[in-house]
């Protein structure tokens, strides 16, 4: 489903989701920012690298509190944000964290 989109960014990373008072790992894979060639809308997509299952799929929007990147306390390699995610077939407000291999990434 990415043929009508241009890849703006791609980086291998590990995705976490905040559920039941704790961070739970969603999967490791290529975190991508994809821009639709017609509409210009940008979405975040991450597929688990072994199964190719979509574990995050949401539009990047400029509307608080969504998609405001914040450094994760205690780690320079990890960032968190809130988004309206569609990975499981319906829209759900989720809190995510993305951990990279190094702080430079």
Image (cartoon, grey):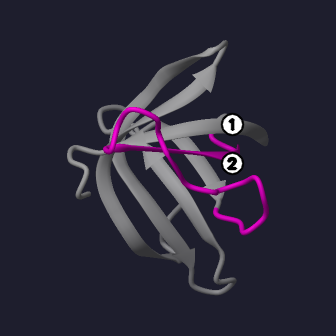
Residue stretch in magenta = 60-87
| Residue 10 as seen in the image, left or right of residue 15 | left
Q: Residue at x 77, y 37 (%)?
A: 92
From what the image shows, is residue 84 above or below residue 35?
above
- How far across and down, in percent of the image, does residue 9 sit? 38, 69
Q: Residue at x 64, y 83 (%)?
A: 40
Structural crowding at the residue carrying mark 1, measured as other residues with C-alpha within 10 Å and reported as few (<14), some (14–19) or many (≥20): some
Q: Name the residue under label 1.
A: 94
Farthest-out residue, bottom: 38
Quadrant of the image occupied by residue 64: bottom right
| Residue 51 as seen in the image, left or right of residue 60 | left
Farthest-out residue, front: 74
Q: Are marks 2 and 1 in contact (CB under 8 Å)?
A: yes
> Is residue 1 something one can see in this rendering?
yes
Quadrant of the image occupied by residue 82: top right
Can residue 48 be found in the magenta stretch?
no
- How far across and down, in percent of the image, does residue 87 sit? 62, 40
* Image mark for residue 83: 2
Give 29 or 93, whichever is nearer the viewer: 93
Structural crowding at the residue carrying mark 2, measured as other residues with C-alpha within 10 Å and reported as few (<14), some (14–19) or many (≥20): many
Q: How far apart in space, not on screen, are marks 2 and 1 (Cα)?
A: 6 Å
From what the image shows, is residue 21 above or below residue 31?
above
Which of marks 1 and 2 precedes in the sequence? 2
- How far across and down, in percent of the image, does residue 22 sit? 57, 16
Give 67 or 1, whichever is nearer the viewer: 67
């Amino acid at each position: 489903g990415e043929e009508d989109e241009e890849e703006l960014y791609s980086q291998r990373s590990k995705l976490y989701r905040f559920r039941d008072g704790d961070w739970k790992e969603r999967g490791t894979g290529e975190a991508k920012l994809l821009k639709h060639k017609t509409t210009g809308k940008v979405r975040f997509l991450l597929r688990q690298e072994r199964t190719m299952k979509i574990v995050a799929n949401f539009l990047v929007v400029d509307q608080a509190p969504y998609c405001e990147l914040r450094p994760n306390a205690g780690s320079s390699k990890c960032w968190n944000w809130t988004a309206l995610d569609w990975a499981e077939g319906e829209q759900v407000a989720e809190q995510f964290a993305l951990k990279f291999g190094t702080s430079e990434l």
